[in-house]
Image (cartoon, rainbow, N blue to C red):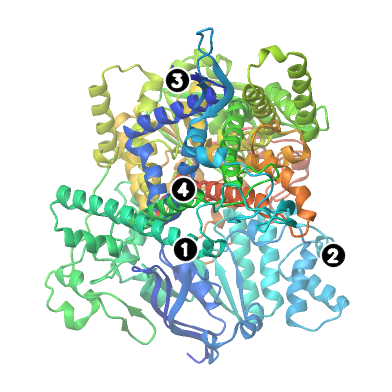
Amino acid sequence: MPFLPVFLWTDILIFLLLAVITAGILYLHNKPHLRAPWIMVMQRKRGVISVIILLSYVFIGVLDSLHFRLALAPQQDKQQHYSTEVLSVLDWLVTPIRTQVEKTYSAPFATRLFVKEMQVGQSGQLEYSYPRLRYSGQHLQSENEKWADVTKIIVNSTLQATLFTLLLISFYLLYKSFRYQRKPMAEIKRLLKGESEFPVRTFYLMVFLLSWLCLTLIMLSQHYHVMGTDKVGQSVLYQALKSIRTGLAIGTLTTLVMLPLAILLGISAGYFRGWIDDVIQYIYTTLNSIPGVLLIAAAVLMLQVYMNTHPENFATIAERADIRLLFLCLILGVTSWTGLCRILRGETLKLREAEYVLAARSLGVGSFKILHRHILPNLMHIVLITVVLDFSGLVLAEAVLSYVGVGVDPSMISWGNMINSARLEMAREPVVWWSLTAAFISMFILVLAANLFADVVRDAFDPRMQKAR
Amino acid sequence: MSTPVLLEVKGLKTWFSSKDRPFKAVDGIDFSIRQGETFALLGESGCGKSISALSILRLNPYPASNIVAGEIKLDGLDLLKLSEAEMERVRGRRVAMIFQEPQSSLNPVLTFGQQVGEVLRWHFTLSPQEIQQRSLKLLDAVGIPDPLRRLKEYPHQMSGGMKQRVMIAMALAGEPELLIADEPTTALDVTIQAQILDLLKQIQRDTGMAILLITHDLGVAAQMADQIAVMYAGQIVEKADRQTFFNHAQHPYAQKLFEALPSEQKRDQRLTVIKGSVPPLNQNFIGCRFAERCDFAWDHCHQHEPKWLATEQSGIRCHLYDPVVAISHSNASKALHTSHLSEVVPSKIHALDVRGLKVHFPIRKGIFQRQVGQVKAVDGVNLTLHNAETLALVGESGCGKTTVGKGILQLVRVTSGEVRFRGKVLNRLSQHELKPYRGQLQIIFQDPFSSMNPRMTVEQIIEEAISATRFRKDTVARSKYVDSLLQRVGLRADIRHRYPHEFSGGQRQRICIARALATEPEIIICDEPTSALDVSVQAQILNLLRDIQHEFGLSFLFITHNIGVVDYLAHRVAVMYLGRIVEQGSRQQVLDSPKHPYTQVLLAAVPEIGKQQLQVTVNGELPSPANPPEGCHFHQRCPRVMPICQKHYPPTTLLDDGHQVNCFLYEENENG
């Protein structure tokens, strides 16, 4: 076999989560009344935009979660050996920018290194100047042509993206006119006027922007370091792409840990009251009063000690880093369920006095049924909104924790580590701004999309809002 | 009339903007108010009354809504042309407003002194001493005892009625020429309502200000108003002085409103209902807005919008009264048809016996949750409900009537006493033993908006009731049963897949009734089932309740504060005061010759159309059930209090056949 698939713990959990979500979507497909709010999400422009952005992030994250080890060239003993380096499909796809490593810092689109070096000049004598980069702009005849070349590439990619989008639109129009037996011209008119149930125009605009971005980045990164390189000469664009999986894993897996605790404890505290309530309140008040960062630091350091004393358990660096990531998710989950739990308890206290719950009790419906049929569905919108908002909070928390030094493994590329390594260079003159900017932009877009999505979802799930709009 | 016009509203239109279909909440209303006059704006909810009032002060929700046309002239000054800064000098100073909910219209973190003082400081230049003086005078004027102490208190330290008085004091602080009262007494109990209405009248006499009263209650309008305008779907459909309006209302809508009011005289007939509901106001009306619901409507009504036909003092918007149009319409006078309904005769068999029911809620304090006292919400209630009988439980809010209902259903823990149903004492059964009896006792709640799970379809809601009590495996039979229930309560069966929020209040209440009927109960506890509804919808629900009582021989425990409903529906009446029943007897006994002083003042406080003048014979408000007064609970407010009342709680005295009263006045009679 040319490669050996590797299943890291977080990979398994991520695919499990994806499977659950897919099952959920299939389940929704047959329930028109449950599907309705989601359709409403997709009918709003903001919904479409945020979903497309989130999906593209998830797509990159999933590609980066398919890990494998490449086979090495056969040795004398005829046994197949595999590389100790764990790669992902994403790594493999973006191979040129992964392997084209410069010596050290270089600015975006630069053709020369950021620092001066002693080198042999054209005329043979030694000079102290900026050396040419090994990979960026090598195809150019002269460095002066650089911007003309970049412009040419962008124009080219724009044309291709436009062509792609137009092709897609025409397929869509043909399908529509065939399906509803309308004239293609009429369909075009409808599209231009925006006369459709879903914001099709916004959708195609997003398709255009995304395909433009992809094509431009792909074409430019063949010849340039689009976002520059970092201290060890690695492409910042590659780092930003790799960070996506780390961020998503922290955001989603932590939620997975936190949800069962928060929901179960929150609604039982609120519904049953009495000593159950007292115990649960006691637990979360205590947990809440311990500074979260201390708890996380202690747990992560303990794990670090364990990993250092048991190196035989981890075959590769990636596995070590992965265990640390998983552990970070667990500990973040344990410290962050209290907020949601508190909200759910309060809401349950309100709901248990609601007249429909009283009506159900007067009908003799059992406690468990009341909890799952009357209380839980009416809390789901809170859960959903908290989860999506927490997601962005957790992505940011990862950055902060890595910055402090108790976050993910230093060998794992993450936004936090990017920021952490970039912070020392902020004091430099001229400043090395691109590392921080790249981390900031990719994080900002994700968090903004998640927040917008949370907003739209909240509106769609609020029964009072459905009529108002 | 000699008194000059104070406020003149002409062609006022306030629309809620929307891209293509503006919601015309107020769509061209004209009226004028003279100095010192009370002008009542009457109508069902959603007719645009409140938005009209807010528009006068330019307080309509902005930017959601806009005043798109019209003029509002206050003493010749066009309010719509003023700048916002100039408007601030009008608000509170020349035109003041009081709102429905005193709870939410006072700032909970400021003392009354600060809130009243703020108005004074804004409109007059006064020294702090003068402000204090005037605040004291104002609180005194609105009948708040011990005003000096009250100035330093916060809203939560006072009861609802007192807060409404403070609201009035704040409104009076600017010495306005016009007071806009938006449903000022709707959130209050009848005895308090009578006090507040009396106060408003007295203030009007003293200061000569005009009042614009917004209400849905015909009784309140009859007590207060000089001029009355009826609003329907954003327009004024009839305007007249009180005498003319209450003696012969002309517009079909106004007539219907009167007919829909439940009362004793209509006991033997079904209440008239207005079919349908107020049309959505975001459409372009072609014909008369009421045509869809009108019994007299003919083709012309659907095609042409009626003109405003004004005479000197009154006006009407109806084709029936348009001499040009009405001639073409031959059968203008359709006979009013009333369908008769024979009285349900209750049997003598006891369906439910409640003996000495007590529900006490502990008050806990401190870190160890030590019990420091208890709220005696229900404190020894005896009730007997016969088969096929409607027993009305009447009382002010906070007297524990709802808790009685919940105690019977075992929805709250009963402290002591017994609820006996079919030979079993329900409150001694375990949850499991109780289960077979659950379906036999059902409840309909006050608020149809919160009594159904918003995330379940109508079908799921009703099926839950079916499956909770009996196991019906056959889905076809079950589905048919749901259909039959929905049809029984007057809904189409195809609504079953819709969610509660898609229905109006009346429709929701029907679904709740269907749910209650699903278990084939013997007893239904109706907890103010119509108090959240408009008069015309209330009539529909009352009709339905009477029909199902006829059909299934149900017993109702009807918890209400609406005496009109009691008069129309009840066989027997129990009056409750602070956790105990003070008088109990047949409807005629209790309502026609009330014995207990509390019942007497309660009935006297109900504003009715025929009544000349409200008698306010009771002061103060319901004491706290956590700390009930010594002796008879009512002695502090009782007009006929005796020394013995302050020491002992009066025992139950049996007067004539089944009429019981707890009062020392009658115990003596019996002894003597």
Q: Are marks 3 and 4 on the same chain?
A: yes
Residue B394 shows up from this direction: yes
Judge left or right: residue B208 versus residue B450: right
Image coords of residue A285 (percent x, y): 76, 31
Image coords of residue A187 (percent x, y): 21, 59
Gap between marks 1 and 4 measured at Cα: 14 Å
Decide which of tag 1 and tag 3 comes sooner along the chain. Answer: 3
Chain letter for mark 3, please.
A
Disc 2 marks which residue?
A: B148
Answer yes or no: do the residues labelled 3 and 4 have beta carbons within 8 Å? Answer: no
Gap between marks 2 and 3 measured at Cα: 92 Å
For the N terminus of chain A, which image quadrant? top left
Answer yes or no: do the residues labelled 1 and 4 have beta carbons within 8 Å? Answer: no
Answer yes or no: do the residues labelled 4 and 2 have beta carbons within 8 Å? Answer: no
Residue at 55% x, 65% y: name it. A144
Gap between marks 1 and 2 measured at Cα: 81 Å
Q: Are marks 4 and 2 on the same chain?
A: no
Disc 3 marks which residue?
A: A2
Label 2 packing within 10 angstroms: few (<14), some (14-19), many (20+): some
Disc 4 marks which residue?
A: A218
Gap between marks 3 and 4 measured at Cα: 26 Å
Residue B107 vs B343, above or below: the answer is below
Between A402 and A124, the residue placed more toward the observer is A124
Between B119 and A222, the residue placed more toward the observer is A222
Residue type (three-letter) at the residue carrying disc 4:
Ile
Using the image, tell me which numbered label, if any, was put on residue A151.
1
Residue B573 vs A21, above or below: the answer is below
Residue at 37% x, 87% y: name it. B312
Residue type (three-letter) at the residue carrying disc 3:
Pro
Between A284 and B202, the residue placed more toward the observer is A284
